[in-house]
Amino acid sequence: MTSEYAEATRRRGLRNLQGMPFVLPYLPFLVVFGIAPTVYALELAFTNVDGGWVAFHNFVRTYDDFRFVPAFKHVLVYTSVWLGTLVVFVVGLALLLHGRANRVSAGFRFLFYIPGALAGAASVLVWLFMLDPSVSPGSFLLHHVVGASIFAQSIAPGNLPFIFAMIAFWTGAGGWIVVMYGALNTIPPDLEEAARIDGAGPITIALRLKLPLIRKWIAYMVILSFATGTQLFVEPEIVQHASFGLVPDTWSANQLAYQMAFRYGDFNGAAAIAVDLLVIGLAGAVLIVTRSGLFRTDD
Amino acid sequence: MRLPALGVRFLILATFGIFFAVPILWLILAPTRTDKALIMGHPIAFGSFHQVALAWKHLDAFSGHIYRRWIANTLYYALSATAITLVVSVPAGYGLAIGKFPGRKLVLSLTLVVMIMPAAALVLPIFLELNAMHLIGRSLSVILPFAFFPFGVYLAYIYYVTALPPDLLDAARVDGAGELQTFLRVALPLAKPVLALIFFFSFVADWNNFFLPYVLLADSNQYPITVGLSDLLASTPSFNPSVGGGGQSVNIFKPELALATLLAVVPIAIVFVFSQRALVRGLVGGAVKE
Amino acid sequence: MKVNRRRLALTLLAAVAATALATSARGGHKASGVSGSITVWVDAVRLPVAKLYAKTHPKVHLNIVTYDGDGNGATTMQTKIQLWNRTNKGWPDVIFSEQANDPVWMGQKPFDYALDLKGVFPANLLKGWPKPSIAQCTVNGHLVCLQDNLAQEVLYVNKKLMSQFGYTVPKTWQQWAALGQKVAAQHPGYIIGTIGDSYGAWLYLWADKCPISQVTGVNTVRINASDVHCTRMAQLLDPLVKSGVVSYESVFTADFATKYGGDNDKILLMPGPVWYAKDIFSGTLHVPPGEMTAALPLQWNNEPLVTGQVGGGPWIVSKHSKNQAAAIDFVKWATTSLAVKGKVNALSPGYPSYAPAATVWLKSLNKDPYFAAPEGPAFQKAANLIWQGWSMVTYPDQPVWSNSVVTQLVAGKSLSSLLPALGHGLAQNAQAAGYKVVTN
């Protein structure tokens, strides 16, 4: 064994731990507030109230609950609408904003972002008024697009997935636009210059150059939005309170999990529903991670 | 050929701008109007400054100036937790991006899994853990869970993977810098955009977090503004019929609620404006797009 | 000698008893000797009461926590009690809740929070609560709460409009419906009531003895939406809803206020609870002063008069309390003391459940110039008329009414056609909550 070989081996050994010290401070947080509670919840999902193992009984039991299927149906429709509009408009708006970075762009970014600053309870007041045709600034749209002349018609059951998607878009798009804009800023400007010199128009630059370069960010956004979409909670809760119960407090699956846990004290059932949502979210994540190479660090 | 494109671009941005802005405009104008005017007057109109002063008086008087305490609490929780998050998440993202240690992919996957787990199921175990640590009822019971910000770790990770040329790091190493030096001298200064992003998102997430403090905090004096706002809402007859008779004497109506909401948004708007500058900075190569 | 001794003993006993009765009946603004510390959870409206207690009872260290009141179907208290139970500490000694059915689940497993007040709360004071109120707070034989204020339903009358149009105030539901037909024809746009509130069932079905929330045994509830008491009321209401003279919007919506309140002033009559009085008509709906008053609740033909109730917040004492004496004293003072209940003000905005206090409170209410005529007499009579066949249960029934009935009424369906859905929805919720559902 030559000394060079030994040297290379030793260095390889060191390199095998490269990066780990930087991750160490994060690990206690990950374990205490992430992994341990998740494991606990997983355990709850497969046991009963006395701690005995019941395999899939909680899953079957919650599936049979009269609110389960409607709740999942609701989130399915909602997530499709929400994800579609989010990806198209967030990426589109970010690209439009990036086309010419100037003060106007900054102004629009601020405008798009500000609704995101309104947390749950804060939005109740605003949306109670926005959805009420008799006082809303958008009453024209409510009358002619939604066909509603009173509040109770705005939030008719058939409209709910779209109403929630609209509210969620209003509060959530701005944040992702900021992220995408930041992502676009990581593209070296020389690339853009080179493309422009080659004669590419702004749309070509946006779609052929910029878009592929922010693939990983878009993938991240889709993964998270898919999960947050299926785990919809805040918007139906808001509208439920604002409508004095016209919208049920178990409209979405996540709301049902919450009610199970706290209204009935059925933490095992709640954990089962949470695991259902986790599996759905993970399936989406795995699909996107593998297709977009999110975990690859070599490109 | 440029001009129509510009026009279309502006039109699209403006349309969305209106969608995002009009409800906010309503919110800004609402404290200037009386409750009656809000319901029976024109949707967008200005009332009077006097009404704003009155609304603030009522809001401040609610429950012994508790509104101020709520804002102060939220600032304290959000800033403390974000400080911890920055110190913990940025190096973690860096380590995951450049690292080759066994378990790297595991940490990434677990972080993602944990982010996807619904919060409703995690609340009970977190409560029990904090109880075992004797932290229930103390600020740390809120700050520590807030400081766990996997989203930030991912932001840093993606940033370092896509925007950090490995040659830069190798150059530093060849010069004899150790890993820590390389990070502090090269990687960290370059991370200003993502630092700003993480600071921004962490602060906002902490500011807006409702569920965890709602469950963990028993004393309303410790509430952050989100939980406080829902308390306020519950004290308004038009939002909570069960408050029954007596809601009137509490003096919280729509103008007061609107003011409370608006004031709660101001810190976020400020943080946004400051983070913007750093967000806009370009990258390796130094060009700054302003 | 023996006889004398016995008589002596009896006299002594009587004397002691008399003294005891006399001291407890004093109602006490003098701190009755309790001390120590207790924690009370109140909503914003009850905060002044807690503060005043702390001020007037310096020997008791009162830790006041304000919270959202758990109203409107919230699960705040369920969440908190679950977590306290898990760690075996943290329960407050006294809770005020805005949800009338909170004590029901608080008094049963798995929450098991409420103290049985029978035997602990002075029995002679308990007599001051109307029988329906005590019944509402009794779960499986235990008195798990005491109502702070009552919410009996009366018929609100716009005296000015009624005399302007030359109508007489109806005494029965039938007269009310007939008047409605007249109003729809002669004065379209005016209303005689609304069923769009989340508690619409309490106003119209409870008032007609419809058995869709009747606890008949331990964990057994009777839900029969096809009972004649339910169907006949629905049939009465259907044409009125169709013609618009009974609205399907909640009084708390902006649209309702715009259409029927304020300057439009189109509310002719309205069945509603006593707490509408000024807070809703003046505060929420901006109806001009000098118009509103209240009449007795409506009667079904010449059947005995009963009425419904919309809420009435309860006080609950913790069975884990380490200072039960102070906790009971607090509740006693908050519900019966005239320092709290004597006037209509921030301390006592609602109709006191404790009848002797109510009498004094009403004197103050009757003086209010907002009303066209004193509402007191109607309020007082209605307090004892609440039908006891509607029980509080662990699950809230308002959301079922809202999202299976009101949403469909808005879409044009009739109440009669929606009763089966209502019954079915209630049954599903009851079963999910662990009740056995019967129809008889």
Image (spheres, coloured by chain):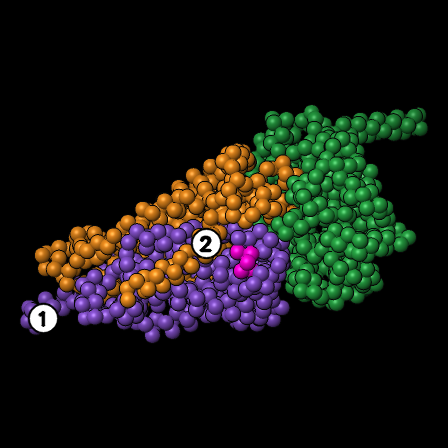
Q: Residue at x 62, y 33 (%)?
A: C48
- Residue A203 vs residue C440: left or right? left
C98 or C274, which is in the foreground? Answer: C274
Report the residue marked by disc 2. Answer: B126
Q: Position of residue A170 (x, y in %)?
A: 45, 57
Amino acid type shown at disc 1: Tyr
Q: Is residue B53 shown to the viewer in this render? A: yes
Chain rendered orange: B
Q: Position of residue B121 (x, y in %)?
A: 49, 60
Residue drawn at the location 46% of the way across and 54% of the way down: B126
**Chain A is shown in which shade?**
purple
Q: Is C104 placed left or right of C70 in the picture? A: right
Check the residue under mark 2 and report the chain it is in. Answer: B
Q: Badge 2 local density, few (<14 within 10 Å), some, or many (20+)?
A: many
Q: Residue at x 49, y 38 (%)?
A: B67
The part of the image, by quadrant, that contains residue A251 is bottom right
Task: Identify the colour of chain C in the image.
Answer: green
